Image (cartoon, grey):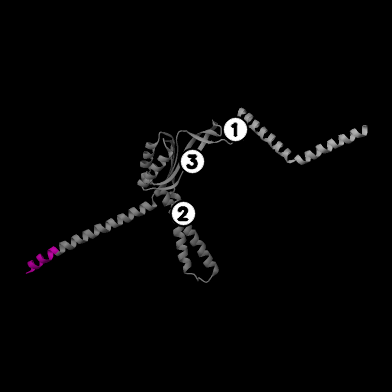
């Protein structure tokens, strides 16, 4: 009978032992994960910033491709712009009232992006493939571990001080004011650490790119009034016509004064007759 009981309980004991071993492994894994998480927080905080300048075939197309690659790599745009500057300008005569404007201009592009730190190398490799020529490329690494740990230490100490002040009478103005000051510093240090974590997680890269100078041909109106004057012979013909018009206007004006002219003629004839009689 005892053998039967022992045989019945043996599987249960074996299962219980296995369960304990499994739970032990789970506990060990949890501790390991906690240790790794703690180590990742207290580990090095390296911030990366990169900068590149390069020549491309087309600035607008490159800006669009960069936007696609940034999104594919899990990053985001901070700033993007293009600008064209005239290098040389000249205007030549095209017709009587128009000019041909020739502009030699240069187009530059700027893209500032945040890229996951572990994808920065892959991203820069893709950017280099877009370039016709790379003027320069740089990467700067800054260790923010000391600042992060110092902020964490101060935050822990300030939280401890706040907890101690909570035990004091809260109706004292000095206690309340001091507590608010400590809480403000704690929030500022926590925000500083969040910014450090953001810098570490995402690297900032500045891309300056440009294309070869291009020439633009544009027909514009002539802004010089002298260019709109007719030619010499046209002006001679116009003056003859204008003189004939003025002559006709004078004749018309004289015909309007016919009564005055007739009166003057009669007065003149009368005066001559009167003078002739006196001489006789």
Above or below, 189 relative to 50 = below
Please give the range of residues in magenta: 1-11
Point out residue 200 in the picture as x, y percentages from the top left corner: 41, 48
Q: Quadrant of residue 159?
A: bottom left
Q: Is residue 105 magenta?
A: no
In this view, the mark in front (1 or 3): 1
Point out residue 196 in the picture as x, y percentages from the top left corner: 44, 51
Q: Earlier in the sequence, mark 1 or mark 3?
A: 3
Q: Is residue 2 magenta?
A: yes
Residue shown at the point (47%, 38%) measured from the top left: 108
Q: CA distance from mark 2 to mark 3?
A: 35 Å
Point out residue 141 in the picture as x, y percentages from the top left corner: 43, 43
Point out residue 203 in the picture as x, y percentages from the top left corner: 41, 46
Q: Which residue is mark 1?
A: 227
Q: How many marks?
A: 3
Above or below, 47 relative to 20 = above
Q: Are marks 2 and 3 in contact (CB under 8 Å)?
A: no
Q: Which residue is mark 2?
A: 192
Q: CA distance from mark 2 to mark 1?
A: 67 Å
Instruction: Give the number of the disc on residue 83.
Output: 3
Q: Are marks 2 and 1 in contact (CB under 8 Å)?
A: no
Is residue 108 in sight in this rendering? yes
Instruction: Give the number of the disc on residue 142.
Output: none
10 Å neighbourhood of mark 3: few (<14), some, or many (≥20)? few
């Amino acid at each position: 009978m005892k053998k039967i009981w022992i045989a019945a309980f043996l599987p249960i004991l074996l299962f219980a032992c296995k369960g304990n071993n499994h739970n032990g492994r789970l506990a060990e894994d949890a501790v390991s994960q906690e240790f790794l998480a703690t180590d990742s927080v207290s580990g090095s905080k390296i911030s990366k910033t990169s900068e590149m300048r390069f020549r491309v075939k087309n600035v607008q197309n490159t800006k669009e491709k960069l936007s696609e690659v940034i999104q594919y790599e899990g990053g985001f745009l901070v700033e993007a712009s293009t600008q064209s500057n005239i290098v040389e300008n000249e205007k030549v005569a095209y017709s009587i009232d128009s000019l041909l404007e020739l502009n030699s201009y240069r187009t530059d592009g700027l893209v500032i992006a945040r890229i996951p730190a572990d994808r920065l190398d892959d991203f820069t490799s893709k950017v280099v493939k877009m370039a016709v020529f790379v003027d320069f490329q740089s990467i700067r690494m800054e260790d923010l571990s000391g600042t992060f740990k110092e902020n964490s230490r101060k935050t822990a100490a300030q939280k401890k001080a706040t907890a101690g002040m909570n035990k004091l009478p809260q109706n004292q103005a000095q206690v309340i004011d001091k507590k608010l000051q400590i809480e403000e510093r704690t929030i500022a240090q926590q925000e500083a650490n969040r910014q450090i974590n953001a810098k570490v997680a995402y690297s900032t890269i500045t891309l300056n790119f440009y294309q070869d100078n291009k020439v633009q041909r544009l027909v514009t109106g002539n802004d010089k009034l002298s260019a709109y004057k007719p030619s010499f012979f046209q002006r001679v013909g116009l003056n003859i016509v204008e003189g004939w018009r003025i002559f006709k206007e004078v004749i018309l004006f004289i015909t309007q004064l016919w009564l005055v002219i007739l009166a003057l003629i009669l007065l003149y004839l009368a005066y001559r007759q009167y003078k002739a009689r006196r001489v006789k």
